[in-house]
């Protein structure tokens, strides 16, 4: 069947009236609606605590900090031996208290009494097994 309006660019008057009737202005969000939505969202999110504030959050933060400190101390090359030569100073083939005495007698520049004490503590053990 041939549609007589197919060649016409004009729409049916009934369709035009129906489209005009359906055409409404969008709803406007007033300041009252805006404040009500803001209050609802504040109340909703007030009950949600951040993860670090939940039970055990501080323990988690403390453990992360402890792991970070230990990692830095283990990786830091200055924490191993620093500038202190913990070595066989007297050439005896073993690192022992005699090396501490030899280092003290050598009067190397930069070696302090604290360095000598640390070296002595490293090589001398007062445990029953003699192993430190």
Image (cartoon, helix red, strand yellow):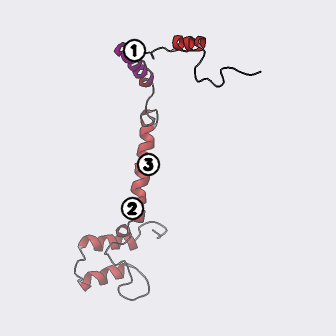
Identify the image quadrant of the N terminus: top right
Of the two numbered discs 2 and 1 on the same chain, state the one appearing first in sequence: 1
Could you say which disc has been placed on residue 64 in the image? 3
- Residue 59 lies, with reference to residue 45, above or below; the image says below
Give the extent of the magenta segment.
28-44
Q: Does label 3 or label 1 sit earlier along the sequence? A: 1
In front: label 2 or label 1: 1
* Label whose residue precedes the other's in the sequence (3 or 2): 3
Q: Which residue is mark 2?
A: 73
Residue 86: image quadrant is: bottom left
For label 1, the residue is 33
Q: CA distance from mark 3 to mark 1?
A: 44 Å
Residue 99 falls left or right of residue 94: left
Q: Where residue 85 appears, x then y in whole percent?
A: 34, 78
Secondary structure at badge 3 equals helix
- Which class describes the residues within 10 Å of circle 3: few (<14), some (14-19), or many (20+)? few
Magenta segment includes 43: yes
Where does residue 74 sit, x and y in percent of width and height?
42, 63
Residue 118, numbered label? none
Element type where label 1 sits in the image: helix
Q: Residue at x 47, y 70 (%)?
A: 131
Check the image and name the residue furthest to the bottom: 91
Task: Look at 59% across and 18% down and name the residue there.
Answer: 11
Disc 2 to disc 1, how far (Cα)? 57 Å
How far across and how far down the image is residue 64, in percent?
Answer: 43, 48
């Amino acid at each position: 069947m041939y549609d007589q309006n197919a060649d016409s660019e004009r729409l049916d008057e009934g369709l035009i009236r129906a489209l005009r009737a359906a055409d409404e202005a969008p709803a406007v969000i007033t300041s009252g609606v805006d404040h009500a939505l803001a209050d609802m969202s504040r109340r909703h999110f007030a009950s949600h605590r951040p993860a670090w504030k939940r039970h055990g959050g501080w323990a988690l933060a403390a453990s992360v900090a402890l792991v970070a400190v230990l990692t830095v101390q283990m990786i830091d090359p200055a924490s191993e031996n620093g500038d202190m030569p913990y070595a066989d100073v007297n050439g005896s083939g073993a690192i022992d208290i005699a090396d501490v005495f030899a280092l003290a007698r050598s009067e190397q520049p930069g070696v302090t009494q604290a360095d000598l004490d640390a070296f002595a503590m490293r090589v001398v053990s007062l445990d029953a097994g003699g192993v430190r």
